[in-house]
Image (cartoon, helix red, strand yellow):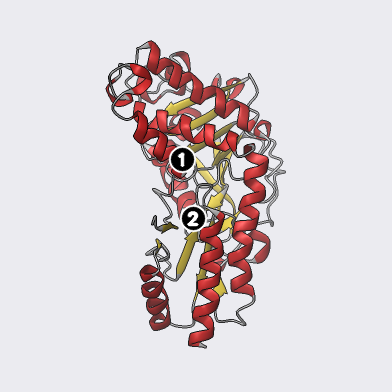
Amino acid sequence: MRAYNFNAGPAAIPLPVLERAQKELVNFNNTGMSVMELSHRSKDYEEVHNRANSLLRELLGIPDNYEVLFLQGGASLQFTMIPMNFLKSGQTGHFITTGSWSEKALKEAKTFGETRILASSKEDNYTHIPTNYSLNDVENGAYLHITSNNTIFGTQWKEYPQSPIPLIADMSSDILCTEIDVEKFDLIYAGAQKNLGPSGVTVVIVKKEFLETAKEDVPTILKYSTHSKNNSLYNTPPTFAIYMLSLVLEWVKEQGGVKQIQKINEEKAGYIYSAIDESNGFYKGHAEKNSRSLMNITFTLQNEELTKKFLQEAKERQFIGLAGHRSVGGCRASTYNAVPKEACEALAKFMTEFKNQNS
């Protein structure tokens, strides 16, 4: 029996993807080699690389005037690359901070230039996505940065800002979970290890027009243009991670695409949020209802002793990864695309049983 994997990242990968990778592991495409052993300049690997690119474009409806890049270093490197390339002297990087990861992006930007927090929900312990901000005075801004989903606090943007300056989004934890209009953004980035595959590759989707505004005095390997001009093959890419990404994207397509994935995700999250809402206060959700995440469901119990008991009994039933982030405690169920519906149903049932036994 496979565990019910609710880890926040690295996270669940669809079982059919794992089984196909297992089947092809030692002899990919009749090459007599693993995909990990192929030259990244070979025709066999090139087909994998380009297939991942074309599938992502198809699934997200990415227009031709956007580049799709496969980079390394995770979202954390993007925190640095973005201001290094786009935060120019005399301009300001604007941020809406909604959790720890947007704080880290802001911290890195400060080392390169002027920054401004346009809005934040920090004073409310990041229980919601801010709405009390104005975009009327950001004309000289380099960009507006947001984090679309907040893994630690369990909040998610439902409507994105209509920004008059370039809009950049860290979508590491919710890319492909719902339909989005890519054209609202000038740059989207996402570490793979939640909805796209294993850790090791970072997807960047960047508008060509925005790319042309980048600074020139940037180290070669850290220029987005270096990678766009070389089809993300300037240096050796994480070939196996990109191969796994292509398999995950094929799986998403087989499920009916992002529209169908969104419907399933809403059902999955609904099971667990209902268990919280119908518990008469036994469980308390961290996020306000209008900001609730489909990907990371955060909640607390009435005391630490009860929380430890809940987590221990959950583990005994093969529910893995339910402890909240060390910075906030409590519990967290990460219901990424690859987490099956039956796992969420089973967790909701266990939560109700545990409440009835311990009320």
Quadrant hosting residue 141: top right
Tell which of 223 and 304 is nearer to you.
304
Left or right relative to 125: residue 291: right
Left or right relative to 300: residue 32: left
Q: Position of residue 139 (x, y in %)?
A: 67, 36
* Residue occupied by mark 2: 151
Residue 214 in view of the camera: no
Q: Position of residue 147 (x, y in %)?
A: 54, 47
Label number found at residue 82: none
Q: Secondary structure at mark 2?
A: loop
Quadrant hosting residue 163: top right
Look at the image and tell me in which quarter the N terminus lies.
bottom left
260 to 247, vertically: above or below: below
Q: Position of residue 118 (x, y in %)?
A: 60, 50
* Residue occupied by mark 1: 16
Choose the circle earlier in sequence order: 2 or 1. Answer: 1
